[in-house]
Image (spheres, grey):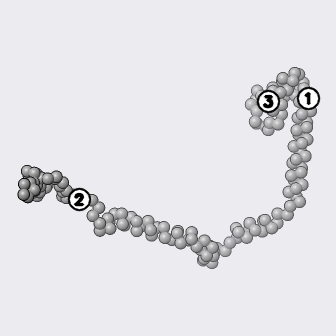
């Protein structure tokens, strides 16, 4: 085998089952059948993986997880019912207050929005605003609505 082929197949040596396409896997097996160097690399990788896995298992066995389990179970097995609810409210006062007030504030906001709060919120049907610069304006109300008549320019007194 050539070093060029080894460079191509070396990254595939650590592939897990199903990671390579069928054609790549077949080519890798064919290369491994005839390449002692890549067989050695694969054996080293498998041995290293086994050593690391064993070291991790040994470290995990050394640690006592009993207090951790007790803490998790204490949190999971909280009292239910009214006592549990009151304890939760005491611990989370701000969240409980906001949760209780949010629907009330939303309802109040909707009431104020739709009622207009007694303010004049803009022109209504039938309202007329007339702006006439230096002209006399007369507004007549008819059955069809208001009619604005603009007269001659207003002359200042004394001119």
**Looking at the rendering, which quadrant does residue 92 occupy?**
bottom right
The answer to whether residue 45 is left or right of residue 22 is right
Dot 2: what SS? loop
Q: Is residue 60 above or below residue 90?
A: above
The answer to whether residue 156 is left or right of residue 63 is left
Give the label, 1 or 2, closer to the camera: 2
Q: Are marks 1 and 3 in contact (CB under 8 Å)?
A: no
Question: Where residue 63 sits: x, y (%)?
Answer: 86, 61
Say the numbered circle drawn on residue 37: 1
Rounded to the nearest angstrom, the CA distance separating label 1 from label 3 is 18 Å
- Residue at 61% x, 76% y is 90
Say the numbered circle drawn on residue 25: 3
* Front residue (pair 11, 153): 153
Mark 2 neighbour class, 10 Å CA radius: few under 14, some 14 to 19, many 20 or more = few
Residue carrying label 2:
124
Q: Is residue 8 above or below residue 134?
A: above
Question: Where residue 106 sits: x, y (%)?
Answer: 44, 65
The answer to whether residue 78 is left or right of residue 96 is right
- Residue at 87% x, 21% y is 2
The answer to whether residue 91 is left or right of residue 142 is right
**Looking at the rendering, which quadrant does residue 104 occupy?**
bottom left
């Amino acid at each position: 085998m050539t070093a060029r082929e080894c460079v191509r197949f070396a990254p595939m040596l650590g592939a897990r089952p199903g990671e390579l396409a069928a054609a790549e896997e077949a080519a890798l097996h064919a290369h491994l059948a005839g390449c002692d160097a890549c067989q050695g690399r694969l054996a080293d990788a498998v041995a290293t993986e086994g050593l690391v896995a064993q070291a991790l298992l040994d470290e995990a066995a050394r640690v006592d997880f009993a207090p951790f389990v007790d803490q998790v179970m204490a949190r999971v097995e909280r009292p239910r019912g009214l006592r549990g609810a009151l304890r939760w409210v005491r611990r989370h006062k701000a969240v409980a207050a906001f949760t209780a007030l949010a629907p009330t504030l939303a309802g109040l906001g909707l009431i104020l929005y739709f009622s207009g709060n007694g303010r004049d919120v803009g022109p209504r049907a039938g309202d007329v605003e007339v702006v006439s610069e230096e002209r006399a304006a007369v507004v007549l109300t008819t059955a069809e609505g208001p009619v604005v008549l603009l007269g001659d320019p207003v002359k200042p007194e004394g001119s």
